[in-house]
Amino acid sequence: LATAATALALSVTATAGFAACDDGEMVIKFSHVTNTDKHPKGIAAQLFADRVNEEMDGKVCVEVYPNSTLYNDDQVLEAMLQGDVQMAAPSLSKFETFTKIYRIFDLPFMFKNMDAVEEFQNSDAGEAMKQVMVRRGLLGLEFWHNGLKQISANKPLINPEDAAGLKFRVQPSDVLVAQMEALNASPQPMAFSEVYGALQTGVVDGQQNTWSNIYGQKFFEVQDGVTETNHGLLDYMVVTSVDWWEGLDADIRDQLATILEEVTVERNAAIGQVDADNRQAVLDAGGVIRELTEEQRQAWVDMMKPVWAQFEADVGAENIALAQEINA
Ligand code: LMR
């Protein structure tokens, strides 16, 4: 067992690519599920680690574990409450068992673009959403952007009717399940790390995700093409455990919070470019992208938007109103 554990530790270290922490440094494990190269979360997590490891050298050391090498998103929050990992940045769809208010971010066509998302998250209502899981032991530190989602399948999707009867992988979110049901499709909740294989073997027919995930996980290789719907949001909450965070020395906590905030501002401002680069990378790698006419896109809006009513009580009518005011 000891040998196996050592081998695992060595291989994790090799894939994670971090410098060994020094004796006496407090180690912060940051676990996430995406790739690192070109990916908004991969880049932001590494920048945070690099800055902490330089500016807080000798005191604090961040180890980033990407690509689900440490935990899947369905395990990481429980591990955090156990004290086995200190930071993570799951998508806002992954907090279903802790809060229902983040469902606002999954509602289809809620935000017209990433500027609107940014403004909503920076509003008082958005700020307050970082605190909603505190009584359950989790503290939201910062929202990180990924981007708007596109949809793909093993056949062309132009009209929403084209999705009927197909199986789509979704993140474990009731909103995303309802959204697929509104298309008369069959939603299949599944861990991110399993999606490529499921698409390849036909366990599911399609998926929805952002350009960086479609490129980073190579979903386009095992799909007929990707339809540019921009129909929903995939963003993240950088999260920690209340107990661990409150237990830090105040000066350490303040410095970590400042670095994290600066990284957030810098990387969230770069999201448009990162998203465009990943879209282009799909094309450069031979992927097919289907653009919709205004009319075609409106047909997707008409099919999906009715799910808002089902979740209004969870997310608050006032929050929907605020998002729409920002869009206007
Ligand atoms: C997904 O499961 O599709 C995403 O939440 C993965 C991620 O972290 O971007």
Image (spheres, rainbow, N blue to C red):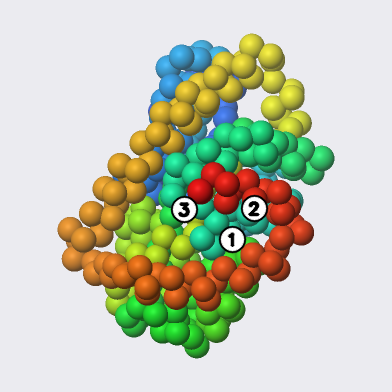
Residue found at the far front of this picture: 328
Q: Are marks 2 and 3 in contact (CB under 8 Å)?
A: no
Q: Quadrant of residue 218?
A: bottom left
285, 35: nearer the viewer: 285
**Up-down relation of residue 18 to residue 52 (above or below):** below
Residue 320 image label: 2
Among numbered discs 2 and 3, the one appearing first in the sequence: 3
Residue at which label 3 appears: 112
Q: Amino acid at mark 2?
A: Ile
Left or right, 16 with reference to 218: right
Mark 1 burial class by Cα count in 10 Å: few <14, some 14-19, many 20+:
many
**Up-down relation of residue 162 to residue 168 (above or below):** below
Left or right, 179 with reference to 78: left
Eye-nearest disc, 3 or 1: 3
Q: Helix, strand, or loop for circle 2?
A: helix
| Residue 186 visible, this orientation | yes
Among numbered discs 3 and 1, the one appearing first in the sequence: 1
Residue at which label 1 appears: 107
Q: Are marks 2 and 1 in contact (CB under 8 Å)?
A: yes
Q: Quadrant of residue 186?
A: bottom right
Q: Residue at x 62, y 16 (%)?
A: 254
Left or right, 228 with reference to 265: left
Q: Residue at x 44, y 79 (%)?
A: 160
> Distance between the Cα atoms at labels 2 and 3?
13 Å
Residue found at the far right of this picture: 135
